[in-house]
Amino acid sequence: MLFIRSSGSQIQYPPVGGTPLFSPILTYGPQTEQEILKCLGRLAWKTVDTIVTLTDQQRMKEDPEFGDAVQCHCMHECTYQDVDIFNSCIIRSNDEPVGIDLSSPGYLAATVIVTTNAVREELNSLKA
């Protein structure tokens, strides 16, 4: 099995399920479906025999200024300049040159991709 990881100052977000695959398996405790899935994930992790380390940032290489701002955000070291960069990244179109207000009736069913469950829950709460 092949495992690919990033190196350097890149941030690795925690797994969606909340438990990394390399975490030890509990030998005692309830055998819930979630615990069984954790065990299966751990077994898959133990089959890794090749690791490839990625050293160059590819996702934001065309916009290093934005990439630097994202890195500062991940490290909780945002500057006002970083905030200005993020605020400039709004949804624009020919019909909406200054941006889209997602709370307007025409966009209530819009799909928004967010980085955390907390943001998703807040948006869902506002829409509800």
Image (cartoon, rainbow, N blue to C red):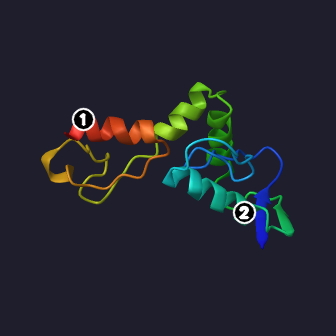
Asked if residue 74 lies left or right of residue 7, the reply is left
Residue in front for this viewpoint, 13 or 2: 2
Residue marked by disc 2: 43
Residue 111 falls in image quadrant:
bottom left
Relative to 8, is 42 above or below? Answer: below
Q: Quadrant of the C terminus?
A: top left
Residues 126 and 37: in front is 37
Residue 22 is left or right of residue 106, and the answer is right
Q: Position of residue 41 (x, y in %)?
A: 65, 60
The amino acid type found where label 1 is placed reads: Leu
Picture residue at 67% right of the left edge, 48% below the top: 20
Q: Where is 118 relative to 114, above or below? A: above
Q: Residue at x 58, y 56 (%)?
A: 36
Q: Are marks 2 and 1 in contact (CB under 8 Å)?
A: no
Residue at 31% over, 58% down: 93
| Residue 58, numbered label | none
- Where's the N terminus, which quadrant? bottom right
Q: Is residue 27 left or right of residue 17?
A: right
Answer whether residue 62 is visible to the viewer in this image. no
What percent of the width, then of the height, locates residue 85?
54, 39
Residue assigned mark 1: 126
Note whether residue 87 is visible.
Answer: yes
Category of crowding for the residue at label 1, using alpha-carbon neighbours closer than 10 angstroms: few (below 14), some (14–19), many (at least 20) = few
Rounded to the nearest angstrom, the CA distance separating label 2 from label 1 is 41 Å
- What element does badge 1 sit on? helix
Q: Position of residue 109 (x, y in %)?
A: 21, 54
Mark 2 residue type: Leu
